[in-house]
Image: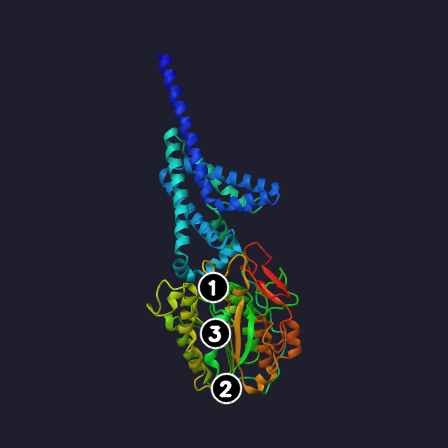
Amino acid sequence: MRRNETKKGAARGAAAVRRLVAAALLFGAGYAVANRFPLVHTVAYRLAAGDGQSAATAFLFLAFQAAVFMAALFLFPRRWAAVLLVLAGASILVNIGYAQLVAELLDAGSLAWLIAEVRQAGNAAGEFGGELLWVAAQVAAALALLVAARRLARRAVTTPWSKDWAAATLALLMAPSVVYRHAAVWPEGAERSLYGLAIDLVTAPPPPPRGAVELAPHRAADAPRHIVWVIDESVAEAPFRRLIAPTLADTRHLDFGTAAAMGHCSAPAQVALRSGVDVRRVDESTDLRRTPSIWAYARAAGYRTVMIDGQTSGAPQNLLLPPERALIDAYRPMPGGIETDLKVADAINRDLKSHGKSFTYAVLRGVHFQYRDHYPAGAIPADSPVARHYATALSWSKSRFFERLLAGVDREQVAIVYTSDHGQNLIPGALPHCSREAVADEFRVPLIAFLPPRIAARYADAPRAGHSVSQIFPATLIWMGYDAAAVTARYDRDLSQPTARFVWFGRTVIPTGGETAIDVTAGSKFPGE
């Protein structure tokens, strides 16, 4: 009798061990799916590069995180486990989605960029529907494997639970994120990194105060009464030149040719433009949050500062932080569907006919992907090539814009600069901009100006190549009455010459979380070439 009971007990024990082994294998498969990109980037790539030590560190730290997660998943009661899986699933979704589209791992700078670009979530969903379905499938597979692993493990053994077990398990579950931030180990697992990075951003020191304007403007008799920067969205230079430039043939303006954007993502490009960049001395330690921005210079020169944003109805976007926001006298959100840019043109036109002095920074809706959202439905066949969708969107967005902008304006008193935040890579299947390996087309933007004749004369012999958007800042300060030699020494050359140095910023354009280094590249070559 006892012998039979012993045999049954041994069989039950063996079955439990098999279930636990199977549960561990299922968990390992699910964890590997969730962390596919960290495993590839930090383990496989490091091994391929001959860096075995880094690969081993990454693998062992991921294994530690997996063991902790598995223990919590198997030990937690049902409701706790459900919460754990929901939180882990959200983090895995963001990590896989970002890595699938951009081909790099999520970090604090990238998360800050994603938050800044959240308004484009709908466009991204439409443009990358197929990729996002594959992302969803990966997340679903990972979660299904994790759920199956928990069920099998819970059937194998009775798991202990008490207040002490709860405290110990929770402490163990949080330990990897603490270790990650205080030791030379990496990467943080996809199931937890979203929350660790979010805490890094939330607990980061507040943005520093903006630097004071150190230059004194003189009263320039030829200073325009109104100065406007019109910053378009995703307008590439070549299509603009082919489709829109001909409409300006009878309108007096200056065309500075192909210019280099200071970023191939919206937020970095616009932060750099608003802040002003010392292109000769910029490096990874530069903090563009500390510069005296264009708003401060405009105010010091007696201009009322205005920002019009055609892309958002809420708080300012593109990393416009409180110290900078405080320098804007009037912030006017102005989204209006596919008619937004004409609405903005009319608003600027009214302001240009007013008395007083104003500096206006206007962000247009432009033609951000998905392009079919920027022209009337049915205008072209849905299966048209991407280049035709883009051209149709650009034509709808800009064909009447400049006419409405300038109608009845006293051109003697107005200076307007038009450019785009970045260009577009229109090769089918390519990420249009903000790609990991940026190409030159993502930086090629138009740069034109509508200036009073007395100022336009300075640029009669200006080259039509070699310019950077960084030159808009010093040129504008000169028009406002600041000393040309001091301004160009501090920032970049005036638009009468090519740029002193091409500079462009990646997603980490300002210090983020505990990081102080920014993502910046500078050199004599056009960005992306």
Q: Earlier in the sequence, mark 2 or mark 1?
A: 2
**Tag shown at residue 426:** 1
Counting from the top left corner in percent of width and height, residue 180 is at: 55, 45
* Mark pair 2, 1: CA separation: 36 Å
Counting from the top left corner in percent of width and height, residue 284 is at: 62, 59
* Mark pair 1, 3: CA separation: 15 Å
Q: Secondary structure at mark 2?
A: helix
**Type of residue at label 3?**
Arg
Residue beneath the point at 50% across and 47% down: 37
Quadrant for residue 261, please give it: bottom right
**Mark 2: few, some, or many residues within 10 Å (few <14, many ≥20)?**
some
**Type of residue at label 1?**
Leu
Q: Quadrant of the N terminus?
A: top left
**Tag shown at residue 411:** 2
* Mark pair 2, 3: CA separation: 26 Å
Asked whether, in this view, residue 271 is left or right of residue 344, the answer is right
**Type of residue at label 2?**
Arg
User: According to the image, label 3 marks what residue?
Assistant: 242
